[in-house]
Amino acid sequence: QVQLVDSGGGLVQAGGSLRLSCAASGTISSINFMGWYRQAPGKQREWVAIISSGGSANYVDSVKGRFTISRDDAKNTVYLQMNSLKPEDTAVYYCRAWGRRSRDDYWGQGTQVTVSS
């Protein structure tokens, strides 16, 4: 089992920045990928950024150049640095961690990000 705790959300004006954190605990060895997803009101959950255990990162086109995902393996924590925030980035952001087995798939509780215009 893996437990994920998301934090760092808040209210920010357009153009501002926030850094989200996802602290993992438990059987970390089963995890190969960690990522951030978001869900806006009335919309489906979408992936935002993913990072592999080797450090390779991928981003959805809408956040490329603005968001950066990183990991600190010593702290079992993944971060999402969000710069140049836009109102359309408003959503609940969820951390996800998963391994190669389907049963190794975990979600954080979510953290609200609100960007005002």
Image (cartoon, rainbow, N blue to C red):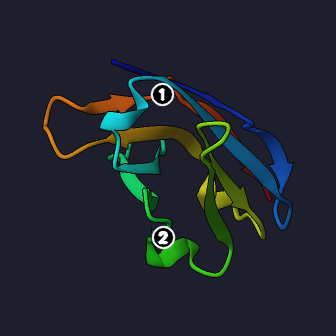
**Left-right relation of 26 to 81:** left
| Dot 1: element | loop
* Identity of the residue drawn at 72% across and 37% down: 9
* Identity of the residue drawn at 49% across and 39% down: 95
Name which residue type carries label 1. Gly
* Identity of the residue drawn at 36% across and 46% down: 45
Which residue matches tag 2? Answer: 57
In the displayed structure, 16 sits above or below 111; it is below
Label disc, if present, on residue 99 of the rendered structure: none
Q: Earlier in the sequence, mark 1 or mark 2?
A: 2
| Dot 2: element | strand
In the displayed structure, 93 sits above or below 66; it is above
Q: CA distance from mark 1 to mark 2?
A: 19 Å
Residue 7 versus residue 75: which sits nearer the camera? Answer: 75
In the displayed structure, 48 sits above or below 101; it is below
Based on the displayed image, in which of its 4 quarters is residue 66 positioned?
bottom right
Quadrant occupied by the C terminus: bottom right
Quadrant occupied by the N terminus: top left
Residue 79 is situated, as x and y percent measured from the top left of the image, at 65, 49
Count up the numbered dots: 2
**Left-right relation of 60 to 85:** left
Residue 67 versus residue 76: which sits nearer the camera? Answer: 76
Name which residue type carries label 2. Ala
Counting other residues with Cα less than 10 Å from the Cα at mark 2, is it few (<14), some (14-19), or many (20 or more)? Answer: some
| Mark 1 touches mark 2? (CB < 8 Å) | no
Which residue matches tag 1? Answer: 108
Residue 43 versus residue 80: which sits nearer the camera? Answer: 80
